[in-house]
Amino acid sequence: MTIAATHWILTLVCEDRPGIVHAVSGAIVEAEGNITESQQFSSDDTGRFFMRLQVESDVSRERFEQALAPVTERYEMSWQLDVVGRPLRTLVLVSKAGHCLNDILYRQRAGQLSVELPLVMSNHPDLAGLAQFYDVPFESRPVTSADEKVAFENRVREVVAEHDIELVVLARYMQILSPELCAELAGKVINIHHSFLPGFKGANPYKQAHARGVKLIGATAHFVTSDLDEGPIIEQNVVRVDHSRTPAELVTIGQDEESRTLTQAVKWFSEDRVLLDGARTIIFT
Amino acid sequence: MTIAATHWILTLVCEDRPGIVHAVSGAIVEAEGNITESQQFSSDDTGRFFMRLQVESDVSRERFEQALAPVTERYEMSWQLDVVGRPLRTLVLVSKAGHCLNDILYRQRAGQLSVELPLVMSNHPDLAGLAQFYDVPFESRPVTSADEKVAFENRVREVVAEHDIELVVLARYMQILSPELCAELAGKVINIHHSFLPGFKGANPYKQAHARGVKLIGATAHFVTSDLDEGPIIEQNVVRVDHSRTPAELVTIGQDEESRTLTQAVKWFSEDRVLLDGARTIIFT
Amino acid sequence: MTIAATHWILTLVCEDRPGIVHAVSGAIVEAEGNITESQQFSSDDTGRFFMRLQVESDVSRERFEQALAPVTERYEMSWQLDVVGRPLRTLVLVSKAGHCLNDILYRQRAGQLSVELPLVMSNHPDLAGLAQFYDVPFESRPVTSADEKVAFENRVREVVAEHDIELVVLARYMQILSPELCAELAGKVINIHHSFLPGFKGANPYKQAHARGVKLIGATAHFVTSDLDEGPIIEQNVVRVDHSRTPAELVTIGQDEESRTLTQAVKWFSEDRVLLDGARTIIFT
Amino acid sequence: MTIAATHWILTLVCEDRPGIVHAVSGAIVEAEGNITESQQFSSDDTGRFFMRLQVESDVSRERFEQALAPVTERYEMSWQLDVVGRPLRTLVLVSKAGHCLNDILYRQRAGQLSVELPLVMSNHPDLAGLAQFYDVPFESRPVTSADEKVAFENRVREVVAEHDIELVVLARYMQILSPELCAELAGKVINIHHSFLPGFKGANPYKQAHARGVKLIGATAHFVTSDLDEGPIIEQNVVRVDHSRTPAELVTIGQDEESRTLTQAVKWFSEDRVLLDGARTIIFT
């Protein structure tokens, strides 16, 4: 398929060697492109080279890809060629709490978040009205048994396949994904969770945070791996609190951090700014 | 001893019951005082009541204390009557890293931190010149064996007794205090350590933080208990970092947070703004 | 009318003199109240004393007011006795931009903002759907001539009177209120505007901010006086930007700051935490 | 002179045209270099292209410059080839306030700021001891008349020439530089000043900020032009304050922001991260 487009995003990952930038920029010259933005990073940890370019060019995708082919082959690159502003096909999973979903929907409508939302799925019906207001299809099905969980995840697989989903957002979806689904969707699932200094294990962390009198509470957006809450970190934020906050107030404050942190992570992902370097992320902001 | 003074700080802690504020303010009226600042907090966790007042009064300390006595006795209060701006007798312990000590000394001289520093003690000689520049006595003695550690801590005890030390600041003192010394100085020792989201156990946490690609690093100032790094939190700060930071750069950034966080905690303590409520602090800022 | 209530908010302003706290706390003892939160401030600028108390008491409003009367009279106090959590009767004025309104509506529904919204008024019809989703009446009427402006403001007066409105929020309402209306509603109208370092005069400030390469952009919520954008400041926030931001992106970033800053100001106002001290505000947070 | 070095910084500015990156990276391949860091920006405002590269290469400076020559000539580039970590020859001017100077000296000694300080000049003797502690020559001469001002500035010119000064830092130097000196040192002088939202004109801005009850105060580091305080902005920071702060406390808080903001600006400049694009700066952080 030929897409005539002006602004492209090109991301590249390969083993770090001399001459890569020259080779890539040569291919772009051949594609009659002008580089308008460029970021790169050489990882001392893994020896890998990461690059993100924005390129203005009026050639077709085929011609662009033909120009790139000799370079991506020689350097054995993982690469992606995208168009600036193309809405990312995104599936959102939620449970009962609406703060993250509301922020995503509002910003998508306001033109601040370039995502396409074919469906919101939930294990509870509570947020149907919110999705409906923003004209986004909503589907809920209970997950109260192992069988229902398998059915829910199979439905996720169907939706991912049917809509060619590029990103699954766990917007306070309170079920743990099965290791199998995590593996199938590796690098494509973003989760949000609260964060504290120091960290707390076990139930009701806000109550523990209150008991210890923490002065900062925050949120972490990260890729999901089968090791829950331990995937590569994409974004983190904190906010200051004091001794007078009740556990309930800490929850409210924490939710605000969760919303803005998750939306930021989704936005960067949708703009191809998030690359994986082993256990950590390279964020080209 | 009678100190004629205009601005007093009165802190009070007792079981929460009706009428405390009226009783306290009555005593202050009797001491011909005018309340210029007042903060209070009732802890739902422990059922205790905390109050900090600043009072203008020209009566003597004796008369002020006489006016307070019926109230503090009736409510079985822990209380303290201090004079605004009186330098806190402070002992600083350091090792090799000078960033925290430099900040304390600079701000003390600049009139921003009301502490009196009869001595800086260290297990290394490296920071003697820095102390000397600020005309603060400095004493170093090695701590490389159990015996030397006992000797060092005994010298701490001596200095605390001799100078009637009110606060011991561990300004990157890299030795763990013995449980006995922690117990003797309970509520009087402030430590600073780096903080990460998530937390990391074991050696070289900055390297681990780099490996996990954390986006925030910070510092926590806390009271020392025998359970190291787990005492009541006084102050926390974080700063944003990205993937391009080397472990060495993370160390530098973390040190800045340590300095400002520790100095802030010491400042609040010297102004009688830090009260203990079980495992957490009440900070009247 | 007698309202049986447990948690009260009492705010007081008067000339600063000795004995106020004792007198007030005595009245509260008489009203069988327990002070659970207390903040005060003596202004060196104006010589006035400000106090905000939260009090638990099961007596009726009449009895509480009777207990207070001798004190409020003796000290010639301005005072207010409110019930914690009572929704503030609020009129929101908007134009076309929905970011501030969306935030207010979402947080009101989420239980994070205690306001009652009998009406949203606008000089444009664009935001009718947003109000409707949240079941809030919406009314738009054009303001394109002097006559229409008079009519709009008269309708504001009607609504304020009919619903006994306590706060008018200009949530990006792009018309300047007449000096007469400002005077009538003095201390009851909160506006939000963008803020830059340095400030910029004239049209399209985001374009100017871009041209000067500012590194911080922000928002200021303030009371409206007839001297537009120059009333007492309630809250300010900023966020970091860099050279790569287009003027359009600066607008988006600025809007986020506007939303959160305005909502915070409204929240504090609804909790009786905002008091006026001449040209500046006392915020008891 | 031939300097054998491993890590280079190359900065380039020219009219934006296609093929620049390819041409530059070709020259680097010819210089046997490996690009380890690269940032670029195309200014829509001025049509200019900005690039900063870090390059590992063991060739001599001559060979590197020979490789670059055809490219820098063809594109009519302004360019600079520097070595990572080379201390910047810096002249610091101060008056009486030591907070900015202390921060620069401490960080230089701690290895966090790569500057070489042949001299600190002042119009007052107060800070001689601070400079002496850090073994930096200090020279003071009064500036109380037009003649003394001319003499002081002539001495600045001498020092700049003698030590081949690359940067002049006004670290709270409270004299206005003459338009002639500003012109001679254009792009080489960094100043720091306090910043408020809104801005205040005239004497004692902290008092004005207090009177208006501002909630944020901050600092701006900028290049000096003959139009004082209005040169291109390099860095800005703010910090939150509340109504209880006296004007004197606002000064202390503002000074902290000044120190860290100025040091950050000097650090970026010393690392060739600050480029000028008309009235604004491009900061490659």
Image: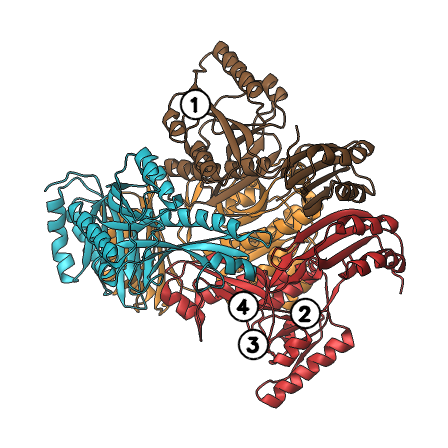
Chain colours: A cyan, B red, C brown, D orange
| Crowd rating for badge 1 (residues with CA inside 10 Å; few <14, some 14–19, many 20+) | some
Which chain is disc 3 placed on? Answer: B
Q: Quadrant of the N terminus of chain A?
A: top left
Can you tell which of label 3 and label 1 is closer to the viewer? 1
Q: Are marks 4 and 2 in contact (CB under 8 Å)?
A: no
Q: How many marks?
A: 4
In x, y percent, where is residue B136?
A: 71, 71
Three-letter amino acid code at disc 4?
His
Q: Secondary structure at mark 4?
A: strand
| Crowd rating for badge 4 (residues with CA inside 10 Å; few <14, some 14–19, many 20+) | many
C-alpha distance separating marks 2 and 3: 18 Å
Give the number of the disc on residue B174.
3
Disc 1 target residue: C138
Three-letter amino acid code at disc 1?
Phe
C-alpha distance separating marks 4 and 2: 17 Å
Q: In front: B41, or A87? A: B41
Q: Residue at x 82, y 43 (%)?
A: C19
In x, y percent, where is residue A264?
A: 37, 48
Q: Secondary structure at mark 2?
A: loop
In x, y percent, where is residue A33?
A: 20, 44
| Crowd rating for badge 2 (residues with CA inside 10 Å; few <14, some 14–19, many 20+) | some
Q: Are marks 4 and 2 on the same chain?
A: yes
Three-letter amino acid code at disc 2?
Lys
C-alpha distance separating marks 2 and 1: 59 Å
Q: Is residue C225 visible?
A: yes
Three-letter amino acid code at disc 3?
Met
Disc 4 target residue: B193
Disc 2 target residue: B188
